[in-house]
């Protein structure tokens, strides 16, 4: 985390300095994976078409901590975060199962500590997905993460950098399920893990449950039978000063509340990652159909 922040901090500070003289506009950021880019583009287009406020996009900025620093410093005005991520990674709370309780807690704490407001969630839960190849799941009778413990000593794991560091990540998962792999998990970019699993470079990964590549690459998600992961509802996090400056902003984004189901988010990700459609086109078509 520290290394990532050190690399991007000069960029964030420069961007923050420019905010003092920038014209009247909203700056929308995103994390460095497809779903975050898609949701940011949906939010950006919704703002543009409902309010007429110019929107600047700063997509694919980096991971959770990079985007959190960016919005705190004013380098961006809003981005999409996940409730469980904020609860455990930013606020350092132990995982909690109640989706509503997690959302209420992060809403209150972000307002108190950072001057940030959480809007209501989009409607889907993108939890961590412990994934294996379909052939291996069939061969070894793997249905749950508990089942994984039987084969883990002979397997190689590959996880994203954040998953290896977070409070709701690998260390806690391994302790909860008694997982011991043949060697320390390989750290890799989250966007590369699914392909690495499909190509046999690793045997198990922690992906996203709404990833469109799960079906396309014939992967299987193991059930979290011991309830380790908290809810990860996606929602817009926005600076309070932006809401004050642009009163129409909240009304526009509120129209997205509850508009995307798990299956719908998976479909949108498939359009981008599997069919290689442009995210701006995907967002435009979805908004025209779902939020006319």
Image: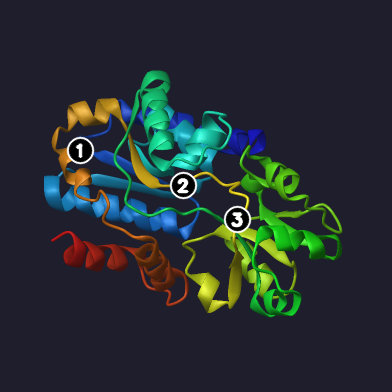
Label total for image: 3
Q: Residue beneath label 3, please?
A: 224
Picture coordinates of residue 206 (x, y %)?
Answer: 63, 57
Picture coordinates of residue 76 (x, y %)?
Answer: 37, 36
Residue 240 placement, left or right of 76: left
Q: Residue at x 21, y 61 (%)?
A: 287
Image quadrant for the N terminus?
top right
Q: Residue beneath label 1, please?
A: 250
Colour scheme in use: rainbow
Seen from the viewer's position, the closer of residues 251 and 170 is 170
Picture coordinates of residue 273 (x, y %)?
Answer: 47, 70
Q: Residue beneath label 2, please?
A: 232
Q: Earlier in the sequence, mark 3 or mark 2?
A: 3
Image quadrant for the C terminus?
bottom left
Quarter where residue 283 is shown: bottom left
Q: Which structural element holds mark 3?
A: loop
Residue 155 placement, left or right of 120: right
């Amino acid at each position: 985390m520290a290394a990532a922040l050190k690399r991007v901090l000069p960029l964030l500070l420069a961007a923050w300095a420019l905010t003092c003289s920038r014209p009247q506009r909203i700056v929308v950021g995103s994390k460095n994976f497809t779903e975050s880019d898609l949701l940011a583009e949906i939010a950006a287009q919704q703002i543009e078409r409902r309010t007429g406020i110019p929107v600047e996009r700063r997509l694919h900025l980096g991971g959770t901590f990079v985007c959190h620093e960016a919005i705190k410093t004013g380098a961006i005005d809003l981005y999409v975060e996940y409730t469980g991520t904020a609860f455990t990674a930013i606020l350092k709370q132990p995982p909690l199962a109640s989706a509503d309780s997690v959302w209420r807690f992060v809403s209150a704490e972000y307002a108190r500590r950072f001057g940030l407001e959480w809007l209501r969630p989009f409607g889907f839960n993108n939890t961590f997905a412990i994934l294996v190849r379909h052939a291996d799941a069939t061969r070894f009778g793997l249905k749950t993460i508990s089942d994984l413990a039987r084969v883990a000593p002979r397997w190689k794991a590959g996880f994203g950098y954040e998953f290896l560091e977070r409070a709701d990540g690998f260390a806690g998962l391994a302790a909860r399920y008694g997982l011991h792999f043949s060697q320390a998990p390989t750290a890799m970019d989250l966007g590369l893990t699914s392909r690495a699993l499909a190509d046999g470079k690793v045997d198990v990964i922690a992906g996203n449950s709404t990833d469109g590549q799960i079906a396309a690459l014939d992967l299987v998600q193991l059930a979290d039978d011991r309830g380790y992961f908290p809810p990860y509802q996606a929602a817009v996090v926005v600076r309070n000063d932006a809401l004050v400056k642009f009163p129409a902003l909240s009304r526009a984004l509120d129209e997205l509340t509850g508009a995307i189901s798990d299956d719908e988010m998976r479909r949108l990700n498939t359009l981008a990652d599997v069919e290689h459609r442009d995210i701006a086109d995907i967002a435009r078509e979805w908004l025209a159909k779902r939020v006319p």
